[in-house]
Amino acid sequence: RVVILGTRGLKGFDGLEGCQLSSRCCSCEIQGQPHSRVQTVGVADNPNPVWNQHIVIDNVAAGDSLEFKVLNKDGRDVEELVGKGILSHTQFFQTGFDGELLLSEGTVEAEAFLLVS
């Protein structure tokens, strides 16, 4: 079980061309296993959303890492990657994890974090 809490340090919505309203959501999957993907609800018009959403990832095995993606979604369900963070199995598998993951890739322009517990 994972709790996706929210983000810290993200900028506003500059990305989706022609987008009037955007929302941010976060997906989580076992790295390399897209069929395991689960996703939070979208939070509209907030660059640093708070989800506080409990999710369950089934069939996580020793050695698996979790991949988190923060996404912008527009009204047409077009997704844009804001940033990605990886939680390696050594960080959570036996003792759990409560902290921040540095977001990289996507449209992240400054140091930004995903808060996970």
Image: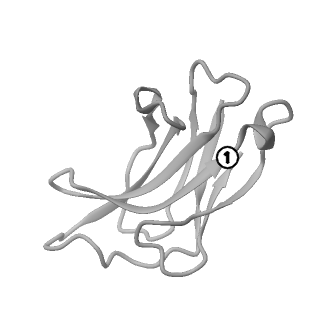
Compared to 98, does 102 lie above or below? below
* Visual colour scheme: one colour
User: Residue furthest toward the right?
Assistant: 95
SS of the residue at dot 1? strand
Compared to 24, does 77 lie above or below? above
Task: Give the quarter of the image for residue 46.
Answer: bottom left
Q: Which amino acid does label 1 sit on?
A: Leu
Q: Measured from the top left, where is residue 38 in percent x and y?
A: 45, 34
Compared to 28, does 9 lie above or below? below
Q: Is residue 95 left or right of residue 27?
A: right
User: Residue furthest toward the top?
Assistant: 59
- Label 1 neighbourhood size at 10 Å, few (<14), some (14-19), many (20+)? many
Q: Nearer the viewer, residue 68 or 77?
A: 68
Compared to 19, does 116 lie above or below? above
> Which residue carries the number 1 mark?
87
Image point (80%, 37%), residue name: 96
Q: Measured from the top left, where is residue 70 in percent x and y?
A: 46, 56
Task: Give the quarter of the image for residue 89.
Answer: top right
Q: Is residue 24 left or right of residue 19?
A: right
For the C terminus, the image quarter is top right
For the N terminus, the image quarter is top right
Task: Give the quarter of the image for residue 13.
Answer: bottom left
Q: Measured from the top left, where is residue 52 in percent x and y?
A: 59, 47
Image point (61%, 77%), residue name: 111
Q: Which of 72 and 33 is in front in this view?
A: 33
Q: Measured from the top left, where is residue 35 in percent x and y?
A: 40, 26
Image point (46%, 78%), residue name: 11
